[in-house]
Image (cartoon, helix red, strand yellow):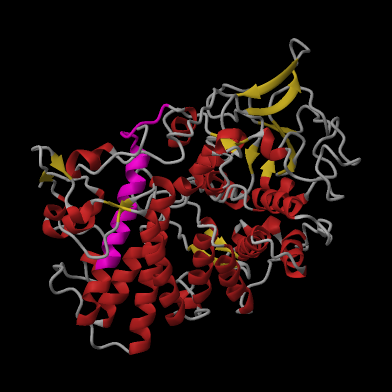
Amino acid sequence: MKKNIIGLACALLFVLAGCSDDFLERSPSDQVSSANFFTQEKDLIYAVNAAYASIGFNSWGTDYGYSTDLLRIEALTDNALDHHSWNAGYRLADGTASSYDGYVETRWKERYRGIQRVNRILEGADGVTDISAELKARLLGEAKFLRAYFYFDLVYLFGDVPFLTNSINPDDCAPTEGAEGEKVAAEECKRTDKTVIMNAILTDLTEAANDLPTSYSSDDLGRVTKGAALSLKARILLYQEKWEEAATAAKEVMDLGVYTIYPSYEDMFTYQGINNSEVIFDLQEMKEKQWNFTMQNYGPNSVGGWSSGCPMQSLIDTYECTDGNTIDQSSLFDPNNPYANRDPRLTYTVLYPGHDWRGGVFNTIPGATYPGKEIVPGDDLTDGTNGQWNKTATGYNWLKYISEDDIDNGDYWNGAIHFILIRYAEVLLTYAEAKVEANDIDQSVYDAINEVRQRADVNMPSVTAGKSQDQLRTIVRRERRVELAFEGLRLMDIRRWKIAENVMPGVPKGLTYTDPDSGGEVTLSWGVRSFDVNKDYLWPIPQAEIDVTHIEQNSGW
């Protein structure tokens, strides 16, 4: 059969073709059809398991490099850049992407693949009778959460999208003939106002939270919990600027008494931090299964990585000094030693010149002179100069999620650190931001912010009471940026705060150093970025989808 790339119907096509794409189309040992699948408890469990697979993906296909593409969107922000022109992070940031972009198409397709799986679960679950009411309700709650997660991702990237709550076949989205003889999208597959979609998935999340447990035994770790449903609900409400409701949902998570701030920021994104007390929802990745190549993509070249995402100077400058003041206000900041006396999260998140790492000192450019720690030749881990193949373009590399264990074991393509999608620190900052924006500022706002800042191995000074709404808004936004860097949330933040047009255009800059040959001062940079407010707040609808369904394209694309 000729392979159809319509994202809206791709999951069902595998069944119609008599082949299997995932566990949803296959029992443990026998090929099955969609007509007879949902008959036993295990069928429903396998189906829900298959729906989880659409959370993480890679533009090479599902189950390859699970978290890699979720991290890639960091390079579409003022936190980082991607200097590989074939990656979406490069094209979508410099204005050269189009509706034919492969990554855009994959993200669209995989999200609708997951939605299709969930819709079939919700339709077929009634056929399963050898199951307790409690387990069935829990599994359907997991499915509703996943569908909400997929739709939220689609809406914040693409805006109004087709809202499908029933499974479909390819004919359902075939275009019809309009009054003038032109082809128009089928009614069921037209784009739906995003507000309608958001309201519907909020209802799903409320229902799911009522049926989900607060925790699981070790055999089911990684499944959706009540806390995950409420946390996603709080995130969506925050992005809708429903401040009071967002604060209420976040407070429900806080009041569960299940989650606490993990004492070690340094360890949280390593194998040591897997399933820690702060994790609300993550990708439970496995070696030899998902082929997570975060180390290969983002590790520094000195240890075999590709440096695909490079932190920018603007992110480095956002970290406060240890007295709680920004670098332009703190007496502790020394431009000749810029990484000293800084928020410890900088050291845990970014590799910078002079960073003690792996028994040596991280360097970027051989022979260069940097402000800060002296780098002794022969004692450094030299990464390479700007413009060289797979070398950092900014002088900085990510350290968060870069595992020394994977380096030592040669697991560049086979990492298994669980990528955290929702954690308790975000919930606390959601609560604080919602209360600040509602101008409902009380001690609980300061407590939430300070709980994040005073993690044991961070221990930044408390934010003291008496701040204005504007001051607290600045503090919360800065705290989100440094706390959640390289976790895929910055793109949503600069969009919802409507600051993307201010922080994205221009030449993205990295560190400044003294050239060893000329003796002159050089600032690393890479390309020029653009941001069109009339276009770039949304991604283009994939052209492959438009060609087949004739749905409308986003403005400017």
Q: Is residue 301 visible?
A: no
Instruction: Identify the image quadrant of residue 304.
Output: top right
Instruction: Identify the image quadrant of residue 134.
Output: bottom left
Which residue is rendered at x = 51% and y = 48% of the image?
Answer: 411
Decide: is 89 above or below 489: above
Q: Is residue 266 left or right of residue 555?
A: right
Q: Nearer the viewer, residue 557 or 6?
A: 557
Which residue is rendered at x = 35% and y = 43% of the image?
Answer: 60
- Is 15 inside the magenta-drawn segment? no
Decide: is 288 above or below 385: below
- How many marks on residues? 0
Q: Is residue 404 left or right of residue 454?
A: left
Instruction: Read off the magenta span.
Output: 96-119
Which residue is rendered at x = 30% and y = 72% of the image?
Answer: 46
Q: Residue 243 in the image: state x and y as whole percent.
A: 58, 63
Name of the residue lying farthest toward the right: 331
Magenta-drawn stretch, dominant element (helix, strand or loop): helix
Q: Nearer the viewer, residue 404 or 540?
A: 540
Q: Residue 89 in the image: state x and y as whole percent.
A: 47, 36
Where the C terminus falls, by quadrant?
top left
Which residue is rendered at x = 43% and y = 67% of the image?
Answer: 202
Q: Is residue 416 left or right of residue 146?
A: right
Name of the residue lying farthest toward the front: 179
Q: Is residue 171 visible?
A: yes
Q: Residue 544 in the image: state x and y as whole percent.
A: 24, 39
